[in-house]
Amino acid sequence: MALDDVAPPARGTVVHKVLNNNVVITIDEHGRERVLMGRGLGFQLKPSDSLDPDKVEKTFILDAGDQGDRERQLLTDVPYPIIEAVTRAVDEAERRLGHHLDRFFTMAVIDHIQFVLERLDNGIRIPVTNMPELRVLHPHEFSAAQRMAAAISESLGRELPTEEAVFLTMHLLNATRDEPNGTAALLFRRLQHVVLTVENGLGVKLDVDSPDYARFILHIQFLLQRLVSKSMLRSADTSFFEFAKHSYPRSYAIAEEVKAYVRAATESELTDEELLYVIVHVERLASQVGANSGGAHGGGENEPPVVP
């Protein structure tokens, strides 16, 4: 469940602290602080009073130390409707993705949504790119994030900005990916940099809904993953590379910029075979731009070959 539910309290459970009308703390048989939440659960209760277990909606063990203090403060300060809306949305996301989302994820989203609403109340909206790469690379997480944002909006009667789906997707990726040291987030930032390099080289914003764009994104993702696993494509035959290099000079120049970025970011050198595929994909994007604008944007007259 969204907040690492443990067994519900027994009747006669005594209140240790009342954080607010909806959140109380008890002490379990092991001496640990247990947080219990529910609408009106703490109303008119005092320490040493017995609580009504039928009102408890969520319960979890509070961490010791600074982490527990932060969680306790968050649950004290954030209005309960936000906590309720987020926990329900997270429960739904768990079912959609078939992946457990722990309390740390839920707390992060509660804190995030509270901050978003505070900014909106003050007339502040932070613009953010739509990050269309997310829809291509992580469609399930992006869809779950869109549903989370919609569910939270419905529960609170507040319209969240459309970009919240992007932020929630990133939260989901951080929570569901097992790569160490933020590898997934790092690869995504590098992919974004490559996309920006290509757009700057072509002087356009790419059509994020086109099949060629999706193929390009997936190829760059796999290329970056091959760099991590040190399994880059290699070939003894350089004739096709030399053909592409001379036939598509602009796409080759952009590919060289990508190669320079990869070298600076990863201290790895792209092979000619890897560079060849970058050239071909960039040329297909350039041809797409040319077709849409009615002009020729490719570096040569040859139609670039289809690449899976």
Image: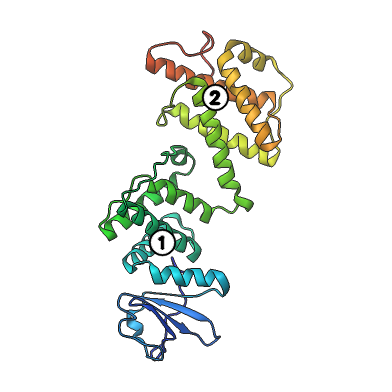
* Horizontal arrangement in the rendering, residue 48 relative to residue 234 (left or right): left
Mark 1 vs 2: CB contact within 8 A:
no
| Figure check: 177 above or below 301 | below
Tell me the colour scheme of the image: rainbow
Residue pictured at 55% horizontal, 34% vertical: 193
Residue at far front of view: 122
Confirm whether residue 4 shows in the render.
no
Residue at far top of view: 301
* Horizontal arrangement in the rendering, residue 171 relative to residue 233 (left or right): left
Secondary structure at badge 1 equals: helix
Snapshot quadrant of residue 106:
bottom left
Q: Residues within 10 Å of mark 2 (few under 14, many from 20)?
A: few
Secondary structure at badge 2 equals: loop
The amino acid pointed to by label 1 is: Ile
| Frontmost residue, 69 versus 132 | 69
Q: Which dot marks residue 87?
A: none
Residue pictured at 40% horizontal, 72% vertical: 76
The amino acid pointed to by label 2 is: Val
Confirm whether residue 233 shows in the render.
yes
Image coordinates for residue 52, horizontal then vertical, percent: 34, 85
| Figure check: 24 above or below 50 | above
Quickly name the residue at label 2: 307
Quickly name the residue at label 1: 110
Image coordinates for residue 90, horizontal then vertical, percent: 40, 60
Residue at far left of view: 157
Task: Tell me which label, 1 or 2, sits earlier in the chain.
Answer: 1
Snapshot quadrant of residue 47:
bottom left
Residue at far right of view: 236
Image coordinates for residue 60, horizontal then vertical, percent: 47, 75
Residue pictured at 40% horizontal, 51% vertical: 145
